[in-house]
Image: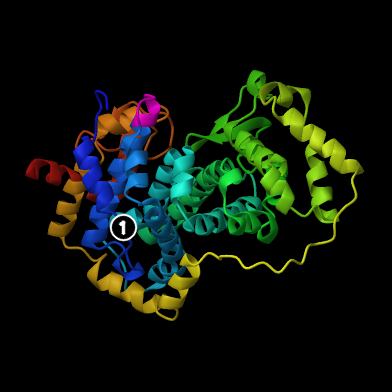
Amino acid sequence: MGDLELLLPGEAEVLVRGLRSFQLREMGSEGWNKQHESLEKLNMQAILDATISQAEPIQELLVNHGKIPTLVEELIAVEMWKQKVFPVLCRLEDFKPQNTFPIYMVVHHEASIINLLETVFFHKEVCESADDKVLDLVDYCHRKLILLVARKGGGDLSEEEQFQDSTPMQELQKQAEMMEFEISLKALSVLRYITDCVDSLSLSTLNRMLRTHNLPCLLVELLEHSPWSRRVGGKLQHFESGRWQTVAPSEQQKLNKLDGQVWIALYNLLLSPEARARYCLTSFAKGQLLKLQAFLTDTLLDQLPNLADLKGFLAHLALAETQPPKKDLVLEQIPEIWDRLERENKGKWQAIAKHQLQHVFSLSEKDLRQQAQRWAETYRLDVLEAVAPERPRCGYCNAEASKRCSRCQNVWYCCRECQVKHWEKHGKTCVLAAQGDRAK
C-alpha cells in the first residue's frame, strides 16, 4: 500500500471483521473507543489508497464481510445520540468534565463514518452491498440536505470569536454545530454516489427518493441557495477542504465540486429510464425543475457536456402537460433503523446521559493518559499529513500554520502568540498526550 502504509492487509481484515453495532448507552465506552480507533485507521487507509490510485482493499473488505450495513447503522445511531443524548449531557448542571475530548470523539464519530462511506461509495458494488439499509442511508442523507437548505448563509464568525468566553461544554456544542455542516456536505456526496446506481436500486428505494422525499426538487433548492458559497467583503468564497476559501476572479466561472455533485445527481434522477418511470411530474415539480434552465449556461455545459441532455429534457418539459399526483397502492420496504432505535430508547435519554456521565465520560487521570496514548498511536502524524488536502491550520486562529506544539506534536500554530492564547484550552490534552508518548 505504498511507503505510508498504515495497515497491513491482514490487520485491515481483522479490523473490518470486528466491526459491530453498539447500543446508544455504550457510546464512549472502552469497547466503543477501540472500534472508533479502528474506523479512523480504516478511514485513513482508504483515503491513502484512493489518493495514490491503487487497489482499494478497504472497500473490498467492507463489501466481502458485509459490513456496509453495520456502518450505516452506526452512522444513524451516533446521529441519534447527538440529537437526543448530547443535549441532555450539556444541560446537566453537575457535569463539569476536566477534559471534553472523550465526548468530542463521540461527536466526531459521525464525521468519521460518513467520511469513510464517501470514500468507498464511489464504487457501485459498495452501494449494492448495503442491501435494504440503503433506504436508511437515503433517509439519513435527506435529513442532512434539509439542514443544508435551511442553513442561513454567510455569517460565520471566526473560531476565536465563536469560542470566546465559552465553557468547555459550550465550546464543544459550537464545534458540533460547525461539524454538522461538513457532515451534511459529505452526505450530499454519498447521495450522489447512490444515484449513480439508480438503474439497480430497488423499487422501494426509488419511491423513497422520488416520491417520499422528492429529491429532484430538493436538489434544485440546494443549487438556488448554494450553502457552500458566500460573499464576504464583496469576495466570493467556497467551502472547500474543511474551510472557507476566497475564489480568485479568474476562477469564479469554474464549477466547484459540490455544485457538480448536485448536477450529476439531478442528471441521474431525471434522465435514468427507471427513475423517469417512477417520478411524477406534477405542476409543482415542473415549476421547480424549470428553474434549472437559468443555471444551464454555455460555460457550465462546457465543463459538464452531459448536461446538454438535461437541457433538452427541460425544454421538452416546458411544453409537456403536468401529471396529477399518483396514488398507486404499492407494498414496499421502509427504513427501520431510526424508528427502531427511537422505540428502544424512548424515555431513556436522561438515564443514558447520566449513565455515561458516571461510567463513561468521568475519567480518571490514569484513564485519560492511557486514552491519550491510544489516540497518539491512532493518529500517526506522517499519515495525517499525507491525507491532509492542504497545509495544516493554526489551532487557535485557523490561519496557515508552520509550527507544531513541541510537547505533544499534535497541534499546529502560526505564531507564538496564538500558542500562548490557546494553551489554557489545549494544555490539559497536550500534557496527557505527551505523558502517553513517554509511557510507550
Determine whether the residue tagged by mark 1 lies in a helix, strand or loop: loop
Question: What is the x, y in percent for residue 265?
Answer: 63, 41
For label 1, count other residues whose C-alpha is less than 10 Å away and answer few (under 14), some (14-19) or many (20+).
some
Residue visible at 50% across and 44% down in the picture? 186
Query: Measured along the vertical axis of the image, is residue 39 above or below residue 264?
Result: below
From this viewpoint, which residue is outermost toward the bottom?
Answer: 347
Query: Measured along the vertical axis of the image, is residue 163 above or below residue 392?
Result: below
* Magenta stretch contains residue 51: yes
Residue 427 visible = no
From this viewpoint, which residue is outermost toward the left?
Answer: 439
Quarter assignment of residue 21: bottom left
Q: Nearer the viewer, residue 17 or 42?
A: 17
Q: Nearer the viewer, residue 288 or 202?
A: 202
* Magenta stretch contains residue 429: no
Q: Mark 1 sits on what residue?
A: 100
From this viewpoint, which residue is outermost toward the top?
Answer: 250
69 relative to 370 in the view: left or right: right
Residue visible at 73% across and 50% down in the picture? 277
Question: What is the x, y in percent for residue 8?
Answer: 21, 35
User: Over which residues does the magenta segment extend?
Assistant: 49-55
Residue visible at 37% across and 56% down in the picture? 70
Question: What is the x, y in percent for residue 384?
Answer: 31, 33
Q: In which quarter of the image is the C terminus?
A: top left
Three-letter code for the amino acid on which mark 1 is drawn = Thr
Query: Measured along the vertical axis of the image, is residue 303 above or below residue 82?
Result: above
Residue 187 visible = yes
Q: Nearer the viewer, residue 335 or 363?
A: 335
Question: What is the x, y in percent for residue 113?
Answer: 40, 49
